[in-house]
Image (cartoon, rainbow, N blue to C red):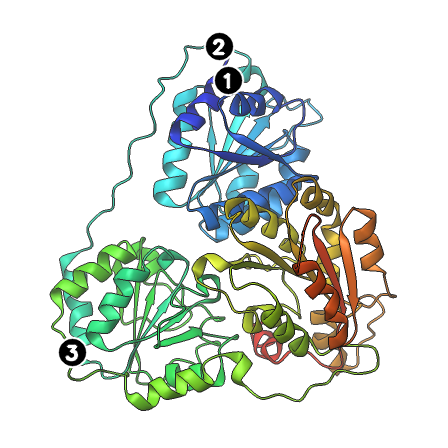
């Protein structure tokens, strides 16, 4: 056995079931070794797409993601997706062939590239190196670049033991931190929990604690849907928050971020935190628990579910006080708690449809068991706000690096992870055109995906950022493109939408057989920027 084969066998033994990538000469044997061990390999058309697919797969499956790339340009092509994963603390292994001879055309300092975007660089010379990469990705929730030098891959070695990596353990939270957080909860009359990425597997524990202390429930954008179905669910906190959520979060006397950075997006640049509001954070890392864009009164290091369970055991039942859970608050959440309940002036007309009208109509048409993935840009608030999801496994949001062009690959990786749901990709025209090669991947995989393109014929964020100041916009506006025709050329079904009646084509596709993916080319109104975008620009 050679090292490349041993690494593939070791990763399969650790539990890797799916890998994504683009195969070249340097990762050919390694990828084939994974396949020979039963790992499903999903071939992308570009390494950038492959990395993002693996990222989304890891988020939605709860498993370690794997992407396999060629040395040098294979890795550099994947770097934007790797940066997004690293910033998001996605458990991901990047298997990269490595040219170590500086005279090679393929040579770059791959370890330095990884470190520059926050990934952890390792170099493997045996199966043990692969097991360590898996352990680090899984237990520390890190994105790991596992470099495999070309000369090392071909060396003979002993077969690895067919045993998985050591089971992960959860360190108990500090008793002092739990006691102090219990004290803050005991003093609070209007607590709000904001759950983030690190809380997506802890709904039961957080709801039990919230019931005990009378807390309202909200999430960051990446954890949207986590508390769906609870009568105390405020949905998303921050730029995508409903007016009611803004009101209730702003009036809280204690906000606890559970696995949530409480960054400027989630707190609207701190404006959702009242001047007298206490703020606490629970995070795996002590340093992260104390870092936020708002002052933190208490940081507790520990796993979210473990800390919440310890608090439930240590906290008296405040049921008689009920905290924020009055009958009036419950009534208002029921009638005002979703964006579909908020009135607006429909601006459709002139051959263009208001993106709110479009998205509300799609929300009514599409099956409830859906998995929505969004790209970045001026449009992205509309699917995030108006497309409801059944739970935290219904929304995949890759925005830590704020790159456009990741949305389609995100939807593919999420769909592979959750084939039981209808995948919905929400893209802007700029991001759609950046990632258009992966349309072939959607068709080849037979994914019954709905791809919605919000087309304003521009990089809309830049138009609305600089246009009001009188700057020329020729560099960020474009002539019309027939995206429906492009989609049909790749083998998709397609409809063009300029008014609500055009969505009849979507309804027909949904009736079946759904044997081809569907692209909805929506020509949307573009007279002004989205309201959440104005808030976002305060951070620039």
- SS class, disc 3: loop
Please give the count of numbered marks on the rendered protein: 3
Q: Is the C-beta separation of discs 3 and 2 under 8 Å?
A: no
The residue that disc 1 covers is 5
Q: Residue at x 21, y 82 (%)?
A: 322
Tell me the crowding category of disc 1: few under 14, some 14 to 19, or many 20 or more residues within 10 angstroms, Cα based: many
Q: Earlier in the sequence, mark 3 or mark 1?
A: 1
Picture coordinates of residue 129 (x, y %)? 41, 25
| Quadrant of the image containing the C terminus | bottom right
| Foreground disc of the pair 3, 2 | 3
Picture coordinates of residue 169 (x, y %)? 25, 41
Left or right: residue 524 versus residue 86 is: right
The residue that disc 3 covers is 318
The residue that disc 2 covers is 1
Check the image and name the residue furthest to the right: 479
- SS class, disc 2: loop
Q: Is the C-beta separation of discs 2 and 1 under 8 Å?
A: yes
Q: Earlier in the sequence, mark 3 or mark 2?
A: 2
Q: Residue at x 86, y 65 (%)?
A: 480
């Amino acid at each position: 056995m050679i090292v490349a084969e041993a690494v593939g066998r070791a990763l399969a033994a650790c539990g890797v079931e799916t890998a994504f990538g683009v195969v070249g000469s340097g990762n050919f044997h390694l990828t084939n070794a994974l396949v020979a061990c039963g790992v499903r390999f999903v071939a992308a058309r570009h390494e950038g797409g492959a990395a993002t697919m693996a990222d989304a797969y890891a988020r939605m499956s709860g498993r370690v993601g794997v992407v396999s790339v060629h040395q040098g340009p294979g890795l550099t092509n994947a770097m934007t997706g790797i940066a997004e994963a690293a910033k998001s603390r996605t458990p991901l292994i990047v298997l990269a062939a490595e040219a170590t001879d500086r005279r090679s055309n393929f040579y770059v300092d791959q370890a330095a590239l990884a470190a520059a975007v926050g990934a952890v660089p390792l170099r493997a010379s045996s199966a043990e190196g692969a097991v360590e990469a898996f352990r680090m990705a899984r237990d520390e929730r890190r994105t790991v670049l596992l470099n495999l030098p070309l000369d090392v891959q071909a060396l003979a070695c002993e077969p690895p033991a067919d045993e998985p990596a050591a089971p992960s353990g959860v360190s108990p939270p500090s008793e002092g931190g739990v006691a102090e957080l219990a004290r803050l909860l005991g003093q609070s009359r209007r607590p709000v929990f904001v759950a983030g990425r690190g809380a997506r597997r802890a709904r039961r524990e957080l709801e039990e604690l919230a019931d005990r202390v009378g807390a309202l429930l909200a999430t960051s954008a990446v954890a949207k849907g986590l508390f769906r179905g609870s009568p105390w669910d405020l949905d998303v906190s921050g730029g995508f928050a409903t007016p009611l959520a803004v009101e209730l979060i702003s009036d809280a006397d204690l906000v606890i971020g559970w696995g949530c950075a409480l960054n400027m997006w989630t707190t609207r640049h701190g404006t959702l935190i009242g001047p007298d509001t206490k703020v606490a954070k629970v995070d795996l890392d002590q340093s992260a628990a104390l870092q936020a864009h708002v002052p933190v009164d208490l940081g507790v290091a520990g796993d979210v579910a473990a800390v919440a369970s310890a608090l439930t055991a240590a906290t008296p039942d405040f049921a008689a006080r009920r905290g924020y859970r009055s009958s009036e608050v419950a009534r208002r959440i029921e009638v005002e708690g979703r964006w579909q309940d908020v009135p607006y002036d429909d601006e459709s007309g002139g051959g263009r449809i208001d993106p709110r009208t479009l998205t509300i109509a799609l929300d009514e048409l599409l099956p409830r068991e859906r998995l929505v993935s969004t790209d970045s840009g001026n449009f992205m608030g509309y699917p995030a706000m108006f497309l409801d999801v059944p739970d935290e496994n219904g929304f995949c949001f890759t925005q830590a690096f704020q790159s456009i062009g990741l949305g389609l690959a995100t939807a593919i990786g999420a769909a592979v992870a959750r084939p039981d749901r209808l995948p919905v990709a929400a893209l802007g025209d700029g991001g759609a055109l950046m990632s258009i090669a992966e349309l072939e991947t959607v068709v080849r995989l037979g994914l019954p995906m709905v791809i919605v393109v919000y087309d304003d014929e521009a990089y809309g964020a830049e138009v609305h950022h600089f246009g009001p100041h009188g700057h020329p916009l020729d560099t960020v506006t474009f002539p019309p493109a027939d995206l429906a025709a492009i989609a049909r050329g790749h083998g998709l079904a397609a409809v063009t939408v300029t008014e609500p009646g055009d969505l009849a084509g979507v309804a027909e596709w949904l009736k079946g057989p759904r044997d081809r993916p569907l692209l909805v080319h929506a020509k949307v109104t573009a007279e002004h920027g989205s309201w959440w975008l104005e808030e976002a620009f305060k951070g620039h």
